[in-house]
Image: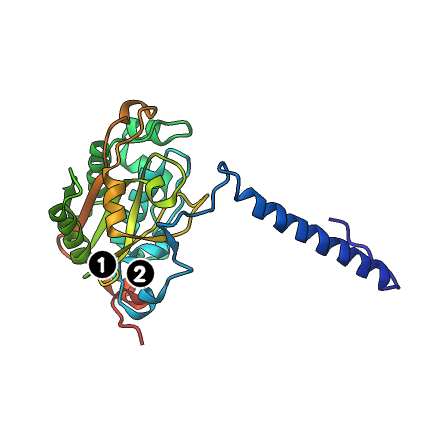
Amino acid sequence: MTIWRSKSRRPLAASCRVLAIAVAVSFASGAGLHADPTVKPKLGPHAITIQQSHDYLRKNLAPDYWALSPFYVPQMSASACSLATVTTLVNALRGLPPLSADELVTQAALLQAVRNEAWASQTAPNGDGVTFEEFSSYVALSLQAYQIDAEVEVFKPVDSSPATLASLRKILTENEQSDDDIVLIHYNQGVITGDWDGPHLSPVGAYDSDARRVLIMDVDRQFYIPYWTSDEKLLEALLRPVPADRGRRAGETGGIVRVTLRGGRVNRDLTSSIGGGRRPQ
C-alpha cells in the first residue's frame, strides 16, 4: 500500500470521495452476490455465533465451556477434525499443568503419544478422515496414552423420535452440570452451518436447557467460530448419513462420545480460578 501526503487537502478529499464510491459499489455488488445461489452467508439460519449470543455464558456457570475454551485448537488439516477434537479434550481434562516445564498437548504430540499409524494417515493432508467407531477408539487410546482415568460412553441415535430427542437432552443436561465430563459430537456440519455436506467432529461447549440450544466449539477454525444450534437440529445433524461420495464412510451416521473422569480433576484449583467453579457475579 502506497501512502502519499500533500500540503493541499483537496487531493485527499477527492481520493476519499473515490474511495467512498468504490466502497458503495462494493457493497452494492455484495448485495447482488447474495442473489447468486452459489454464494452463501457464513452461517445459515440454524446457527448463531457466540458473539451474537453470549448471555448464557455470562449468567451461568457453563463449566465445560471454561474447561474447553482455553485449550480450543483448530484442526491442522482438512481431515484432522478428530485430532483437534481429542487434543482439546485431553487438555481440558488434564487442566493447566502445574510446573513451568510441563507442556500442553499439541496435535503432533498426541499422534506421537498414541502411535497409531492409521490415525496419523487419516488426519494428514488429503487423508480420508475417521469413522465414528474409529473415533471412539482413538479417544480411548488418547486417554490411555496420557494416563487419564475416564469412562467412555457412546450414544448413537437411530431415529428422530421424541424418545431419542429426550435421551439426547438428558445427556446434554447431565453433561452441563460439571466439567468432569466432556461431550464430543460426530455430526453433519452442513445441516447446521448451511454449507459443506459432510461428517465433522467437535466438542460441545455448553447446553442451555431452557432455550434448548447447544454450543458447538467447531474445530474448523479456518471458517468458523463457536456457534449455537437447537438440540433438535443437532439430532438431525447426528442422523444425516455421510454422502455417497465420501468413500469408506459413505452412509454412516453420527453420534456422541461422552468422556467422564472417574476420580475428578487433579488440577481443580487451576481450572476453577478461570471460571469453571466460580459463580458469575
Marks 1 and 2 in Cβ contact (< 8 Å): yes
- Is residue 219 found left or right of 38 in the rendered image? left
Q: Earlier in the sequence, mark 1 or mark 2?
A: 2
Question: What residue sits 77% from the left and 50% below the top?
Answer: 2
Q: Residue at x 36, y 44 (%)?
A: 106
Camera-side residue: 132 or 52? Answer: 52
User: In the rendering, which numbered label is found on residue 263?
Assistant: none
In the figure, residue 68 lies in which quadrant?
bottom left
As displayed, is residue 235 above or below residue 214? above
Is residue 145 shown to the viewer in this render? no
Amino acid at the residue labelled 2: Trp
Q: Secondary structure beneath disc 1?
A: loop
Task: Give the camera-side residue of 20 and 224.
Answer: 20
For image coordinates 14% across by 51% down, the residue present is 166
Q: Position of residue 217 (x, y in %)?
A: 34, 50
Residue labelled with disc 1: 179
Q: Quadrant of the C terminus?
A: bottom left
Badge 1: few (under 14), some or many (20 or more) residues near its Cα, within 10 Å?
many
Classify mark 2: residues with Cα within 10 Å, few (<14), some (14-19) or many (20+).
many
Residue 198 in sight: yes
Determine the residue located farthest toward the left in the rendered image. 163
Looking at the image, which is closer to me, 275 or 158?
158
Residue designated by label 2:
66
Label 2 sits on a secondary structure element that is helix
Which kind of residue does numbered mark 1 sit on? Asp
Q: Residue furthest right?
A: 7
How far is mark 1 from mark 2, CA to CA?
8 Å
| In-front residue for pair 213/161 | 161
